[in-house]
Amino acid sequence: MKKRVIMGIVMAAIFIPLLIVPELFLLFQILIMALSLVASYELIKMYEHEKKYPMPIKIIIMITTLVIYLSALVEWDPNCTVSEKLKLLNIKVEFLPMLIIDALVLFSCCVFCHEFNGDDVAKALLINIYAGLGFASLTILRYIGVRYIIYLFLITMLTDCFAYFCGRAFGKHKMCPTISPKKTWEGSIGGTLVATVVGVCFGFFYSQIFSGGIFGDAQNGFLSGLLKNTAGLNRVGEFFLILVVTILASIFSQIGDLVASRLKRTYDIKDYGRIFPGHGGVLDRFDSALFTGIFLLSIFTILNDFLPALANFTNELNIFKMMVIK
């Protein structure tokens, strides 16, 4: 426990400045890139409990994972407005071409390497998406606003901590006994409730709490600072939108944790690695954050397209009402 606490303090001392200091954004990107490579290596080692891979194949898998992550790299501009970042966001989330290229490379490998078959291609693509796209989502969320990455880690950490405490205090009904015997429905619900309350308060009262701009552009609010058009939303609509997103983010956080546990049980490993003494490997620490990051990036992108349509529909509906009244 002592080693775990000390390592936690060291990790916080490294990550927090990289998260909140704009001038350190390049270092943040480099660190996240390194973590994605370590995570891909951890997954390769996990698969090697079943079957060893030739070294060239390992290198290719790590390179293709790196390609997915590199597609998310951005040039930091402290004077860049939120709307300009959103234009960049729409470009950077188009990972499909990179995935197609990676798939072509990996399928070619199963032709030229007899030890690498179709099943291995699927496993390699999982590594690309899990480690590459997962960490890329963290980079993009940090770029469009430090408040969104803080929001992510608030949800994941509170969900994890209070699921543990509520499970210890009230847990009776096992949630997934074959995957994680200690997790209970009571703990899961408790963790989601606490994370939802704090996450919604952070989002809904963001502009009031951080009016000084500690997380940048506070005057625009949590959603209006990110989304293209929130004209179709009043404060009640904004509240329920943040509520739904926060609940779903907490759920995906727990799913990410369970997915990582399921993979470890499938390949009979205790931890993914030992890079963080007392905590395990990169995936042991970031499993929930990766799933939540992919979800948030996806939902923010969807809302960017949906809310302008909602605003147009609202305007047309108001015009129609006025025509009917006349």
Image: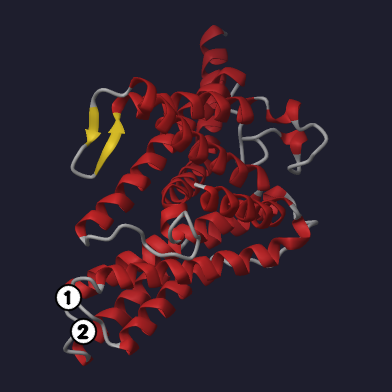
The residue lying toward the viewer, choosing from 110 and 240, is: 110
- Name the residue at 33% across, 23% down: 186
- What's the colour scheme? secondary structure
Residue at numbered disc 1: 118
Give me the residue at 53% from left, 53% from top. Answer: 3
Label 2: few (<14), some or many (≥20) within 10 Å? some
Mark 1, secondary structure of its residue: helix
Q: Is residue 192 left or right of residue 216?
A: left
Identify the residue at image location x=38%, y=60%.
130
Depicted 184 relative to depicted 16: above or below:
above
The amino acid marked with disc number 2 is: Cys
Do the CB atoms of the residues marked 1 and 2 lie less than 8 Å apart?
yes
Judge from the rendering whether residue 47 lies leftward or rightward of residue 75; answer left or right.
left
Check residue 273 in the rendering and tell me which mark sits there, or answer none. none
Q: x and y percent of residue 109 in the render?
A: 26, 86
The one of 219 and 193 positioned closer to us in this rendering: 193
The location of residue 34, given as percent across then percent down, is 54, 70
Q: Mark 2 or mark 1, which is nearer the start of the sequence?
A: 2
In the depicted view, which residue is nearer to us: 3 or 219?
3
Tell me the residue that label 2 is attached to.
Answer: 110
Looking at this view, name the residue that lies furthest to the top: 325
Please rate how many residues cluster around mark 1, counting C-alpha atoms within 10 Å: few if below 14, some from 14 to 19, many from 20.
Answer: few
Report the side of 276 relative to 257 (left or right). right
Q: Amino acid at mark 1?
A: Gly
* Position above or below: 325 against 28: above
